[in-house]
Structure formats: structure tokens, C-alpha cells
Image (cartoon, helix red, strand yellow):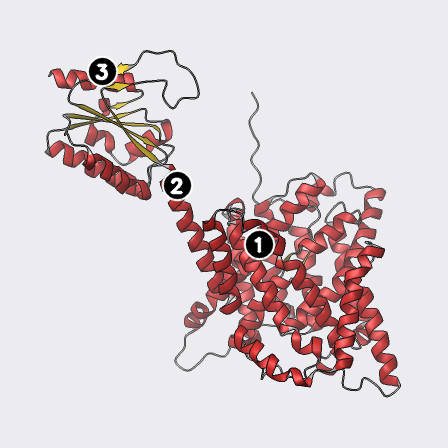
Amino acid sequence: MGTKSKEAVFAPKILSCLKGYDKGTLTADVLAGIVVGIVAIPLAIAFGIDSGVGPAEGLITAIIAGFFIAVLGGSKVQIGGPTGAFIVIIAGIIKTYGLPGLMVATIIAGVILVVLGLFKLGSIIKFVPYPVIIGFTGGIAVTIFSTQMNNFFGLGINSEDLPSNFIDKWIFYFENFKNIDITATTIAVVSLLIIIFTPKISKKIPGSLVAIIVATIAVVLLKNNGMCGNIQTIGDLYEIPDSIPAPRLPSIVLAKNQTFMDYLANIFPAAFTIAMLGAIESLLSAMVADGVIGDKHNSNTELIGQGVANIVVPFFGGIPATGAIARTMTNINNGGKTPVAGVIHCIVLLGVLLFLGQYIALIPMPCLAAVLVMVSYNMSGWRAFVSLSKSPKSDFSVLITTFIITVIFNLTVAIEIGLLLALILFIRRTNEASVIRVFGKELDPNDNSEFQLHEEKLTVPEGVGVYEIDGPYFFGVANKFEDVMSSVAETPKVRIIRMRKVPFIDSTGMHNLQELCAQSNKAGIKVILSGVNKHVRETLYRAGMHKVVGEEFICSNINEALEKANNLIKE
């Protein structure tokens, strides 16, 4: 009889993909990698700028992190790099702790991801509730959208003067809308229309790249003719290097009387948010890809690959990175077969950084704003909002709460509260699903069984109380069971607790059971446990319950329990 093979903790997909690798697969990977690299150019630049670093840092992240995610990851077709989900958290970290703080937070996040992978927690991350994911993804989308109004409408607001709070930011926008620049707005609107309508003409051509080329050429021509002089380009705001910088350590400056451990403690919540967001987004991307290509990714390897990428990239000035769903789907749709396509995509971006920096400097900021407006729309998941509005109110309340907190406060608080709400709802539903039954003088073995046992009803002896726990015996059910026990008018001489439908018992349930047995013993009432499964029995024995109840009174079925109860009554 064969045994099921265990999935290795760290087994990069590229190793298995290179076995039997042929020319046809290489050709497909190269073509897909080139297309994905082209698609990634405007996104990497836009994400870098909007995160508060710069276009070069966005490209460097896509190159270095993308390479490690492809080579060390657990998915065949995952494309990694900077994503819109990180923009809000990165900008917040830079504002509070500066670039050195971002470096430290990203490295810590990378370590957390590696630890999650090594401890095989990849599958657990997948169970983050869907309403929480949609809530904070939608919140991030609204936040990204709100940061683009200045460049989209050419309001000319200094970024340092712009409030960070969502509501104050929009009040400030409305106060400054009188300064709207018609030329900048026209460039942004035309760019947005190009992005929207290009896929309707050809899905192979990335609309964002077409928009950038058209807008850049238009602005250059207009500036050469003495027009559009007030339209800012990337080169007006940022210096574009022609190489990848040498690795450097973060120059951390501690506040007065602050220790390094205090510094790490302050920055850890932000690092944890980066890690959780990266884990969730990368594994969701890998799962979506699996459904399309009919493969199965290794979630623990994927987390380790993501972790290593985030540990390395900050030393080169990069920002947090994760698997990108849109670029991964572009890779699949263009024939990408193995992680080699991800490596080719990195080579394309490296070529852009090394040889096309002077052209990147000419890209107008209103056009990049249009690119990010479209990114925020695609992230918003408004269809999921509509769908979840028809779900149970509890799910929708988690969605709306997470969304509002993400927009009004910040992503770190939103994830924490969203997960807490989801946990509370899970406990509540589990508690509602767990049923405590009290049996009278007769007990039908056919009750609540999917099989017809064709057995006669069992008689419950006088002075015996039979109680059944249907569901997990955990802290949420323990008090419920006590209430049911106390509500029974007549106190029995023997209590039979049927546990055939108890899949597990936690420490609170165990404590509750021990207290019940102790109180029953004091009152001269004997407790018999019935139908205890192997797993629960092991837990009971480890806790010493067999000494409290008596080993012979932990019975495998109700017939045995009733027989022992009958003998005790006679005695």
C-alpha cells in the first residue's frame, strides 16, 4: 500500500522545471518574459514613485526581487516585484522612519516570511477570510486613487503640504481645485482612455505602455514648441541612474535615550504588516495561477522565496515586493511555462534601467497618475463588494469595517482589526454550530446518524443523565455545556457524556471537564465518558483525565457506557 509523499519545505520550482527543459519551452519562456518585462516597466516606475522613493527604486525592486522570487519560489509562473498593495504602507513608513526605517522593516518582513515558510505555515495564510482580503484591498485602492489627484489634475500642490489623513487630503484637494491645469488634465484623461481601450483592440499590447509612449512623445513635442512648460516629468523630480547601485547598510539614527531594541520594537508592526500582506498577495496570486495552468504550487517554498527577495532587495535601495497577480496572468496568457520567464522579465527591466534611463526621465507625471488610477480601479474589487453585500451580514460587516479602517486610519490597524473580527465571527459560528443535547428515558442509536443502524432504542436507567456534545469542545462551548447541565431539574446519580461527535477538545474544554468531574465526585455523582475518538482520548490521557474519571469509565460506545451506569446504579 503506497504512502502519500510529504511536500518539501523548500523545493524551488525551477529545479523540477529544468529537468527535460527543451528549446520549445525556452522559446515560449523568452517571448512571455519579454512581454511581461514590457508590461512591468510602467508599473514598476509608478509604484516606485507613488511609494515615496523613485522610479529607479521601483525598477531595481522588480529586477532583484523578481529574480529571487522566480529562482527560489514555489510557483512555475509567478512574477514578482513591487505592487500597489504596498504603496500605502511604504509611504507611511518613510514618513515616520525615513528610508533607513523602510530598509529595516523590509528586511524584518523578509525574515518573518522565511520563518513562516520554514515552519510550514504557508497553508494557514490561505485561510485569511475573503471579506478581510477584499476589505483592505479595496481600501488600498481608494487610498492609491486619492493620492493621484494632485498629478492627475496638475494642481501643483507640494507633496509635503498634502495632509496624510484621507478626509483632510480631500478637503485640501477641493480647496485647491481652482488651480486645475487643463493641459495636465487632458494628458491624464487621454492616457486613461488609451489604457482602457487598448485591450479592446489588442490584448497582447499593454495599454499602460502605449499611454506612456504617446503621452511622452506629445509632451516632448509640445515642450519643444514652447508649450506644456509647466508639466512635470519624472526627470524634473528624480535622478535616473544608469546602473544598479552597490549594496549598502541602512544608516539608522536612534532618538535620544532610544536603544536599538526599542527601534526594532517600534518598527516591527509595520514589518509584520508587510510580511502578512506579501504572504497573502503572493499565495493568492500562486493559487489563481494554479487554477489556470492546472499545477500546484509549494506555498512554503513560495514564502521562503518571497522572504529571501525582501531580505536582499533593501540593500540595493529597493522596496517590499511580492507576487503580482496581473503580471503573473500576463505571463501565463503569453505562454510562460517555467520560472525562466520570470528571469527573462528581470533581464528586460535591467536593460531598460541601463540603456533607457534618459527616456524614462521624459515620462509626464499626469500619465503616471492615469496608470495608477487604472491600477486602483482594478484593485478595488467593487464586484466583490456587490457580491458580498448579499452574503450574511456578519461577513459584510467585516468587509466594510476593514475597508473603512484601511481608508481612514491605516493598513496595519485594518489587518489587525479585520482578522480579530473574523476570528470573533468564527468562534461565534462554531459556538452556534455546537449543540448540547439532553436525553430522556430512551435513546435511539439511529438519531443523528447518516446510516440506518436498525438497532432497538436503548433504555436510560433511572438516575442516569445522558448528555451529548455535538461539535468541538473548546472554550466557546465549555460555558454552554455548564449552562445546560445546571438547567436540568433532577440531579442524576450517574452522568454519561457522549463525545462521539467531538473532533477535538482544547485546554479550556479540558479544564471545564475536569472541574465537572471534581464537582460531581464531591456530590457523589459518577461521570462516564462515551464514544471518545482516538485523538480526543489521547488528549484526555495526556491531561490525566483517566485518573480523574477512572480508565474503565472512558468508554468506546454508548452501549458500554449504559451498561456501566446500570451496574453503578444497582450497586
In the figure, 412 relative to 25: above or below?
below
Q: Position of residue 557 (x, y in %)?
A: 31, 20
Left or right: 413 as drawn, with respect to 280: left
Q: Which residue is mark 3?
A: 563
Crowding at dot 1, Cα within 10 Å, few <14 / some 14-19 / many 20+, comes out as some
Crowding at dot 2, Cα within 10 Å, few <14 / some 14-19 / many 20+, comes out as some
In the figure, 193 relative to 361: above or below?
above
Label 2 element class: helix
Left or right: 271 as drawn, with respect to 336: left
CA–CA distance in space, label 2 to label 3: 33 Å
Check disc 3 and give the amino acid type. Glu
Q: Position of residue 120 (x, y in %)?
A: 51, 45
Left or right: 375 as drawn, with respect to 5: right
Among the 4 quarters of the image, the one containing residue 22: top right
CA–CA distance in space, label 3 to label 1: 57 Å
CA–CA distance in space, label 2 to label 1: 25 Å
Q: Which residue is mark 1?
A: 385
Counting residues from the start of the chain, the first of labels 2 and 1 encountered is 1
Check disc 2 and give the amino acid type. Thr
Q: Which residue is mark 2?
A: 430
Q: Residue at x 29, y 39 (%)?
A: 509
Check disc 1 and give the amino acid type. Phe
Along the line of sight, which residue is nearer the eye, 439 or 558? Answer: 439
Among the 4 quarters of the image, the one containing residue 98: bottom right
Q: Nearer the viewer, mark 3 or mark 1?
A: 1
